[in-house]
Image: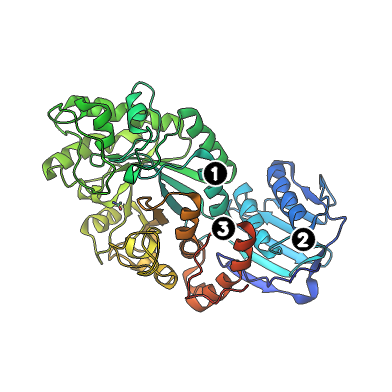
Amino acid sequence: MRATLRRLGDVIPLPVSVRPDPAANFLVSPTVSVSTDPAAADIADQLAELLRQATGHPVPVTGTGGSVEIVLGGYDKSEAYRIDIAAGGVTLRAGGNEGLFAAVQTLRQLLPVAEADEVTLPGGTIEDEPRFAYRGTMLDLARHFFTPDEIKSYVDLIVQFKINHLHLHLTDDQGWRLEIPGWPRLTEVGGGAGTGVGGVGGGFLTAAEYTDLVAYAGQRFVTIVPEIDLPGHVNAAQVAYPELTCDGEPVSPRTDAEVGYSSLCANRDETYAFVEDVIRTVAALTPGPFLHIGGDEAFSTPPEDYRRFLARVLPMPGKYGKRTVGWHEMAAVDLPPGAVAQYWRIEPADDGVARAADRGHQVIMSPADRSYLDMKYDKDSPLGLDWAGVVGVQRSYDWDPADRLPGVGEESLLGVEAPLWSETLRSPADIQFLAFPRLCAIAEIGWTPRAARNWPSFRERLATFGPRWTAQGINFHRSAEVDWLD
Ligand code: ACM
């Protein structure tokens, strides 16, 4: 069977430059091989495997002389890459392995959706590099726990769209999802059966599972950003250790979806001993540069106490070698050097974030009315919430992070992130339904130059992913905003 030829530009996120040359199409012949710089051997193996899956050919990996060649060097930026497809061969070239990995994801989208005997790659040249260094998504493991294998499967999906940070919301009122040696009840009690919203699910990552997950993500150029949400969202920790409440009285487990009722006690030394133990442990387990301390919706922490708490806790990730990230409420105080504020609300302005940007802090843009993957697509969505409104595909695409907040322009942005809260999720299929296609919109906002992207183009390219996702078994949302190809 001959596969349909893809168009060189039918890629998400849209590359910086696409120059098709229909006279230069490359037929992937049965003798195709991949040759590589030894420093990119892993990438070559991954590419060879994708070519095998697409063609059924053996596709050996060799040192030199392959019809598909992987070259390191020639670019200063490690994520910048170039793909040349010509009748005589294909070259992938990048400044670093990140860029080669990105190039492979692009090439993968140019392969047919299912195995075919005769596969042709569209001729021409793609040159590409990202707009922002941080292109993220977040998964809430606290409201519903997903197993390490399920999280790895999500990593495998997000990398196809050049998402390079996975923020894990590891703790909340319902559950505590990361083993902390020295505080065993956090996970024995807080990670037990029935600790998800609705009393469903439960579980936690052992330190070893977390380490393995971080390594798995790292091999795919995804940085894990662990979040320990403080000083609110701590009911599960207080159930496990009543000494973490202000009066030392036990509290009851909660599996409803209320927020803002729990708080650590800013006036007790025990609070800071606990928090520092946790931050030290998480920092030691995490090779990436970021440690997220939450800071959102601390409605039951008096404002004075919130400030006192942050004054002691915000410097802690730095003490253990990490950059502090927090939801933007933390920008009510002066932030330590290098700290990153993550904007998540729906208001048109935020004085704290503008002040932080003015002082040189970077911002991750995650406005709930555009980037929250857990908002319903429309009023009939079977999954999701609607407190920030309904977020259709065009709504998730048609905005720009550099316009979102006064005082927070392009130069202040570290990037964008699409959080996925899990109150209504029960399975990987549910993750897929809410993430696809909207995560692709956020991925393109994070990668593609602003001037190069527009909704009609995105919508048309997105339509070509319907058959691919169907072939991959992905439970994507067939939004009526897109004329999906069959
Ligand atoms: C948040 O949605 N509470 C960060």
Task: Establish whether ligand 1 lies closer than 8 Å to the Cβ of label 2.
Answer: no
Q: Looking at the rendering, which quadrant does residue 184 occupy?
A: top left
Pointer 1 residue: 152
Q: Nearer the viewer, mark 2 or mark 1?
A: 1
Position in image of residue 91 (x %, y %): 75, 58
Name the residue nearer the viewer: 449 or 45. 45
Q: How far apart are marks 2 and 1 (CA)?
A: 30 Å
State the SS at label 1. Answer: helix
Q: Do the residues labelled 2 and 1 touch (CB within 8 Å)?
A: no
Pointer 3 residue: 474
Q: In this view, does 174 lie to the left or right of 351?
A: right
Q: In this view, does 160 lie to the left or right of 273?
A: right
Q: How crowded is mark 1: few (under 14 residues within 10 Å), some or many (20 or more)?
A: some
Give whichever of discs 2 and 1 has the lower sequence position: 2
- For the image shown, how many numbered marks are present on the structure? 3
Name the residue nearer the viewer: 160 or 423. 423
**What is the quadrant of the N terminus in the image?**
bottom right
The colouring scheme, among rainbow, by chain, secondary structure or one colour, is rainbow
State the SS at label 3. Answer: loop
Q: Can residue 134 be seen in this view?
A: no
Give whichever of discs 3 and 2 has the lower sequence position: 2
Residue at the image position 48 percent from the left and 71 percent from the top: 479
Q: How far apart are marks 3 and 2 (CA)?
A: 29 Å
Give whichever of discs 3 and 1 has the lower sequence position: 1
Name the residue nearer the viewer: 235 or 304. 235
Name the residue nearer the viewer: 144 or 382. 382
Residue at the image position 25 percent from the left and 25 percent from the top: 273
Position in image of residue 424 (x %, y %): 37, 53
Q: In the image, is residue 220 above or below residue 352? A: above
Q: Nearer the viewer, mark 3 or mark 1?
A: 3
